[in-house]
């Protein structure tokens, strides 16, 4: 688990969920002028529909050959889909609660994806901004790197319970595999490998920097991901990498920050009313 914000394309993931095969073929607002391959009761199936469908299909099914026979199979699948969709509308199935919710979710996912892509396309990251972040986060970072492991849980109470187990002699690796929400590191007994200060969130680094090798954090550490129990396993000198080696990572970090700022600004302007959530 890298304790930086998620990378740029994954910033779509929390918003874009549950789209599946059908949503992969939704038309965008751009007028489709590609050739018409077939019509079904007057509804067009275009080359663009075909290509969108193939891309989505290939993510879930073995790819078909691109010859005439393969194209015929895909086109027949598209025709069948349109026939079924038209029949569903005639039967009023779009008003069935489960179907209505799924259609609403797909619509919101597609629009959210479009908004994020539009934002990223119109807010380009400059080289000057990348170099400034390099100077700030890489060159000025402490010239040490650390090896550590952690256990990530959702609540402070659970973290305190794990600390008590550790103090009573439980093995860190066993508790990490059992309880940690960070799947990749949990499978390795909580191991994060070697990293430097610029790779982790400030609160995580501050806690780590106050530990001696072999020591476990005396209190749980809070980050945006949850509550951490940290054990420092090693330290060694660190030479900052050249700009070219970290340029892509810096780009993703700035891109994510821009999206976070955009979302914060939009939330401030939105009329949001949250009712009490069930515990």
Image (cartoon, rainbow, N blue to C red):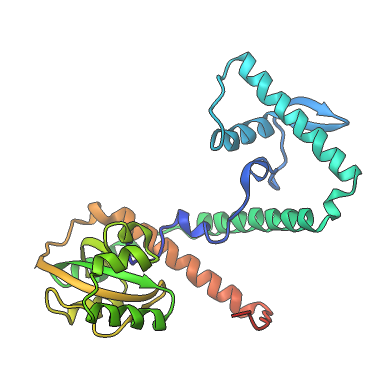
**Mark count:** 0
For the question of whether residue 252 can be seen, the reply is yes
What percent of the width, then of the height, locates residue 62?
A: 53, 28
The residue that appears at 28% across and 78% down in the rendered structure is 165
The foreground one among 13 and 133 is 13
Residue drawn 35% across the image and 81% down it = 161
In this view, the residue in front, 39 or 149, is 149
Q: Residue 127: in sight, yes or no? A: no
Which residue extends farthest left?
237
Instruction: Give the quarter of the figure containing the N terminus.
Output: bottom left
* Side of 135 relative to 77 (left or right): left
Say if 237 sits above or below 80 in the image. below
Q: Quadrant of the C terminus?
A: bottom right
Residue at image x 60%, y 34%? 57
Residue most extreme to the top:
68
In the depicted structure, whether residue 50 falls above or below residue 73: below
Residue 173 location (% of width, % of height): 25, 65
Answer with the quarter of the image where residue 228 lies. bottom left
Left or right placement of residue 108 versus residue 8 in this view: right
Q: Position of residue 26 (x, y in %)?
A: 69, 43
Residue at left 83%, top 55%? 96
Q: Nearer the viewer, residue 187 or 86?
A: 187
Name the spot of residue 255 as percent of width and height, x first.
Answer: 43, 61
Indicate the quadrant where residue 184 lies: bottom left
Specify whether 135 is left or right of 159.
left
As drawn, 63 above or below 119: above
Figure check: 143 above or below 86? below
């Amino acid at each position: 688990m890298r304790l930086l914000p998620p990378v740029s394309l994954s910033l779509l993931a929390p918003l874009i969920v549950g789209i599946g095969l059908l949503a992969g073929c939704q038309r965008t607002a751009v007028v489709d002028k590609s050739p018409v391959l077939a019509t079904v009761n007057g509804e067009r199936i275009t080359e663009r529909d075909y290509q969108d469908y193939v891309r989505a299909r290939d993510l879930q099914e073995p790819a078909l050959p691109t010859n005439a026979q393969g194209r015929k199979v895909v086109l027949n699948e598209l025709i069948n889909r349109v026939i079924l969709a038209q029949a569903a509308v005639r039967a009023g199935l779009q008003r069935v609660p489960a179907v209505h919710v799924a259609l609403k979710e797909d619509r919101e996912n597609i629009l959210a994806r479009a908004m994020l892509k539009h934002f990223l396309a119109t807010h380009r990251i400059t080289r000057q901004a990348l170099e400034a972040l390099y100077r700030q986060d890489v060159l000025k970072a402490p010239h040490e790197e650390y090896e550590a492991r952690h256990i990530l849980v959702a609540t402070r109470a659970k973290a305190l319970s794990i600390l008590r187990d550790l103090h009573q002699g439980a093995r860190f690796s066993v508790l990490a595999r059992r309880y940690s929400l960070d799947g990749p590191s949990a499978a390795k007994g909580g191991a994060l490998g070697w990293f430097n200060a610029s790779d982790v969130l400030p609160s995580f680094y501050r806690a780590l920097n106050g530990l001696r090798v072999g020591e476990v954090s005396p209190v749980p550490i809070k980050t945006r991901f949850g509550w951490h129990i940290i054990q420092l396993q090693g330290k060694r000198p660190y030479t900052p990498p050249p700009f070219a080696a970290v340029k892509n990572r810096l780009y993703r970090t700035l891109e994510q920050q821009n999206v976070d700022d955009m979302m914060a600004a939009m939330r401030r302007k939105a009329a949001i009313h949250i009712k009490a959530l069930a515990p």
